Amino acid sequence: MPPQQKQPRSEKFWSRLIIFGIFFCIFMTWFEYGRARGGNQRSWSYVLEWPVLGGITIWMVWRVNQERKNPTVHEPEIDDPNDHELQAWRAYTNRQKDPNPGANSDS
């Protein structure tokens, strides 16, 4: 059996915060449902909102874990020599970086 690796402190903090957030969403759904049943009509929107927020939290955690397991490799952009707009932009930015635009470096 491989040895258990310790979780970094920041990872423990985020894990606990996410678990708290999910339970908070569950509690708030229950709380707002009680208020809505008591006659507060605005609370019906919150009864729907809190589970959606909890679901988004769970989805984001799932996405982060998937990215950690299978990191996406981003291919570098290909420099197209026929892209005249890109070449013009690079020439413009190079002119902006030049401290002495009128000076000739060969003198």
Image (cartoon, rainbow, N blue to C red):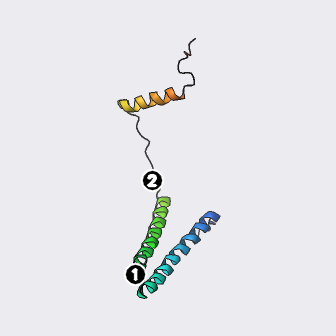
Cα–Cα span, label 1 and label 2: 45 Å
Q: Secondary structure at mark 1?
A: loop
Q: Quadrant of the C terminus?
A: top right
Check the image and report above or below for 68 versus 32: above
Check the image and report above or below for 23 versus 95: below
Who is closer to the viewer here, 107 or 8?
A: 107
Residue 8 seen in the current view? no
Which residue type does callout 2 highlight? Thr
Does residue 36 appear left or right of residue 100 in this picture? left
Residue 61, x across and y down, in percent = 49, 66
What residue lies at 56% left-to-right and 21% top-to-bottom?
100
Who is closer to the viewer here, 97 or 12?
A: 97
Q: Residues within 10 Å of mark 1 (few under 14, many from 20)?
A: few
Who is closer to the viewer here, 34 or 23?
A: 34
What residue lies at 52% left-to-right and 78% top-to-bottom?
23
Who is closer to the viewer here, 30 or 76?
A: 30
Which residue type does callout 1 highlight? Gln
Residue 84, x across and y down, in percent = 36, 29
Q: Quadrant of the N terminus?
A: bottom right
Q: Residues within 10 Å of mark 2 (few under 14, many from 20)?
A: few
Does residue 96 appear left or right of residue 83 in this picture? right
To which residue does mark 2 refer? 72
What residue lies at 50% left-to-right and 75% top-to-bottom?
22
Residue 18 seen in the current view? yes
| Image mark for residue 104 | none
To which residue does mark 1 refer? 41
Residue 4, x across and y down, in percent = 61, 68
Residue 51, x across and y down, in percent = 43, 75
Q: Given the current orientation, which residue lies at the most extreme left position? A: 82
Give the label, 1 or 2, closer to the camera. 1
Check the image and report above or below for 62 versus 29: above
Does residue 19 appear left or right of residue 72 in this picture? right
